[in-house]
Every structure is written in C-alpha cells, then in structure tokens.
Image: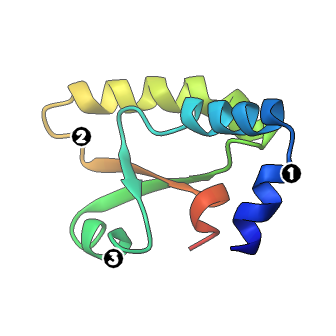
Amino acid sequence: MRLLASLTRLPLSLLITSFALTCSSLPVRSASLTPDNFKSTIAKGVWLIEHFSPYCPHCRAFAPTWEKLAEENEKAVDPGVRLAQVNCAVHGGM
C-alpha cells in the first residue's frame, strides 16, 4: 500500500517516461527470463543471456546490436546458441 501511495505522489510525466523506457527495452526476438522460468528455460542447450536495465545508457546503446544478433540468430536453421534477456530493473540480477 505504501508503494502505491508513493507512486501517486510522483509526477505523471516521470511515470510515463519510466513506463516508455521499460517497454522500449523489452526483448523483441529473444526469450525473456524471469525468476519463475529461468532454470527451466536454460536447462537444455547453450544460452547467451543479456542482463540489462532499460535505465542504463550502455544497455540502451547496445540494444540495436542485440536486436540484430537476435534477428540473425532467429534466421539460422540451427543457431547452436540461444539468446535470452533478463530485465534487471524488474527482476534484479537473478
């Protein structure tokens, strides 16, 4: 309840900006890992996992490179390595 009360005191523009940054940095072509699906998802195969934060300038700068890598990986018949992301702003470092 305290969290909700705190959020209502923030400027609306800040909440909208935060939501937009989070949504714009969500994974597009790679698996999205959470504490609930992390172990079961990566149990088989070889995985390259990007831990990112939508608030991090370096992560945001790397996003186009990750998207290109994910796109190329998706096109491969047998990519060998699967890609996934962990949104650390939402799920911490897992």
Q: Secondary structure at mark 3?
A: helix
Q: Quarter of the image holding residue 74?
A: top left
Residue at numbered disc 1: 9
Q: Position of residue 50 (x, y in %)?
A: 54, 51
Percent x, y of residue 66: 52, 33
Q: Residues within 10 Å of mark 3 (few under 14, many from 20)?
A: few
When the figure is inspected, residue 41 is found, relative to residue 75, above or below; the finding is below
> Is disc 1 surrounded by few (<14), some (14 to 19) or many (20+) residues within 10 Å?
few
The span from disc 1 to disc 3 (Cα, nearest Å) is 38 Å
In the picture, which quadrant includes the C terminus? bottom right
- Which of disc 2 and disc 1 is earlier in sequence? 1
Q: Provide the secondary structure element on which disc 2 rests.
A: loop
Q: Is residue 4 left or right of residue 27?
A: right
Residue 42 versus residue 19 in the image, above or below: below
Is 35 above or below relative to 47?
below
Mark 3 lies on residue:
39
x, y (%) of residue 15?
A: 74, 39
Please state which of the two labelled residues, at mark 1 or mark 3, is closer to the viewer: 1
Residue 39, image quadrant: bottom left
Would residue 68 be found to the left or right of residue 78 on screen?
right
Pick the residue in front: 44 or 92.
Answer: 92
Dot placed on the residue nearer the N-terminal end, 1 or 3: 1
Residue drawn at 13 percent across, 32 percent down = 77
Binning the other alpha carbons within 10 Å of mark 2 as few (below 14), some (14 to 19) or many (20 upward) gives few
Residue at image mark 2: 79
Compared across the picture, whether 62 is left or right of 35 comes to: right
Q: Amino acid at mark 3?
A: Lys
Report the residue at 27% width, 66% height from top. 41
